[in-house]
Amino acid sequence: MQSSKASRRLFLTAAIASVLLLLTLHSSAQTDLTGFWVFRVPTGDGNFRESFFDLKQDATKISGKSIQGTRETPFTDGTFADGKLHFVLSFNFGNPPQTRTVTYDGVLDGSKISLTSQTTGRDPVKGILERSRPEAALPPARLPLPDLHDIPDNGLARTPPMGWNSWNKFAGKVDDASVRGMADAMVSSGMKAAGYIYINIDDTWEGPRDANGNITSNLKFPDMKALADYVHSKGLKIGIYSSPGPKTCAGYEGSYGHEDQDAKTFAAWGIDYLKYDWCSAERIYTGYVPAELQAVYQKMGDALRKSGRPIVYSLCEYGRGDVWKWGSKVGGNLWRTTGDISDNWRSMSNIGFRQFDISQFIVPGHWNDPDMLEIGNGGMTSDEYRVHMSLWSMLAAPLLAGNDLRSLPDDIKETLTNGEVIAVDQDPDGKPVQRISDPEAMSVVIVHPLHDGSKAVGLFNRADTPQTITATWASLGITGKKLRIRDLWKHVDTDSTADSYSAVVPSHGVVLIKVKSE
Ligand code: GLA
């Protein structure tokens, strides 16, 4: 009796011990997180933003690194205990350098981890951490580049393109409804009548490729062809965006290896304008070798030509490789000359006043693009926005409004639709602008010859106090005993028989005149 009780107890103890051992073995097998992982965050439009992590687990300690392109950032701290994962990353960015800390916290859920990332000062971002392979974080193999050849002029954009682009105001929030709303507002506000024709969708419209490799639009754009038809029905044209790399700058599907197919899709949808943004092409090709840039952009230039639809070709590679010297050879109608503009005086004026030396490269059909307008986005004064509009017009730059056209305050509408200033931008001769003042001067005087024999003259004040700015007619190349002067912002005429012109220009302001010999 005693012995059978004892052996039963022994048996039970052994059974419990083996179950515990099995459980321990099982849970430790499941909880070794060592390996390569991808963190997939839904973007809300059917796509996922992916970031990669290489994790190492040593008991409850987690070390490892995040891998984003060529940038690897080691974790500063990490633990995994009771099914809960925690790790921290710190990045240095900007000038002067600032530190950004991202904290990740997750819970094991089967073979995956529900993970939340929290960047200091931002909303938390939720996604799923899944097992992956290091190859998934690498760019695709480099495809050979074509030999260079000159693509014939497509005959489009004889004057700098005018329209609207979604990025500056909407960034990733652009969708079908906002684009339709902008097309409606373009007409009802009088912007269309002033010459603004293109409604351009920037990054984040892209969905995955279908089984045949055709690019699709994502959930924010249910039917791209129907949207293009709608924009066309308003007497407007529609633009779209892609990248020569596998991913766009916002991490969406790019045209890499699908150039001909995408150009055909865009043509079939009825697209009239393509902005083609370098972005992740940098992971495959060398963005500082002009011949490589040129060959990459030539690929899409040829594809657009073969698409059978006239499509304005806008190169966006931030001015690399002196694009103004070869942009027209790849079929480009315009090319970005700078990095991205922001809605503030420093950014706009640093870009705008540095464009004069390359103005000589513009000809009708082929324009320097100092980036889209920020007028009306709220970060500058009315004077500063008038400088923006005047300077871009004197440069014969594309005029792509970047604000919400559905709510246009009167002064913004007046700035954007001033027909006399737009006429300078749209002058059919497309002549370069010439700087008269010293390169470093805070009072900037520039002159732009116009088709009717007159000259547009801009007196710009970059200083923080009002300045009297004077230029002799001779320095501007203007001759004649009596000159008729039209103030393009005040809309008044005066005559001059003097040998110079003087104006008091407000801080961060402009006086823009058109001068004709009588
Ligand atoms: C780059 C471009 C911008 C805009 C964004 C979209 O930064 O320069 O104009 O297109 O990409 O991701």
Image (cartoon, rainbow, N blue to C red):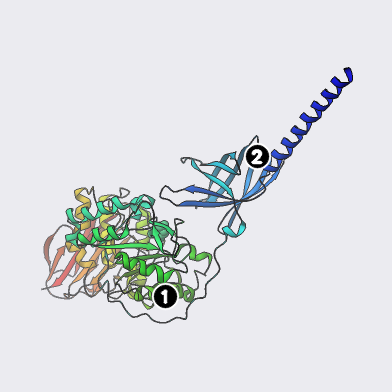
Location of mark 2 (residue):
79
Check the image and name the residue furthest to the front.
1
Q: In this orientation, does residue 186 appear?
A: yes
- CB of residue at label 2: within 8 Å of ligand 1? no
- Nearer-the-camera pick, 472 or 494: 494
Q: Looking at the image, which residue is at 33% across and 75% down?
A: 360
Image position of 510 (left or right of 281): left
Going from N to C along the chain, the mark reached first, 2 or 1, is 2
- Nearer-the-camera pick, 345 or 284: 284
Q: Is residue 239 above or below residue 24?
A: below
Q: In the picture, residue 486 is in which quadrant?
A: bottom left
- CB of residue at label 1: within 8 Å of ligand 1? no
Q: Say which amino acid is labelled 1.
A: Gln
Callout 2–callout 1 Cβ contact below 8 Å: no
Q: Is residue 36 above or below residue 83?
A: below
Image position of 14 (left or right of 283): right
State how far apart marks 2 and 1 are (Cα).
50 Å
Location of mark 1 (residue):
298
Q: How many labels, in total?
A: 2
Q: In the picture, residue 362 is in which quadrant?
A: bottom left
Q: Ligand 1 quadrant?
A: bottom left
Image position of 147 (left or right of 368): right
The numbered disc on residue 133 is none
Image spot of residue 9 (x, y percent): 82, 23
Q: Quadrant of the N terminus?
A: top right
Q: Quadrant of the C terminus?
A: bottom left
Q: In the picture, residue 161 is in which quadrant?
A: bottom left
Image spot of residue 276 (x, y percent): 39, 66
Mark 2 neighbour class, 10 Å CA radius: few under 14, some 14 to 19, many 20 or more: some
Q: Say which amino acid is labelled 2.
A: Thr
Mark 1 neighbour class, 10 Å CA radius: few under 14, some 14 to 19, many 20 or more: many
Label 2 residue SS: strand
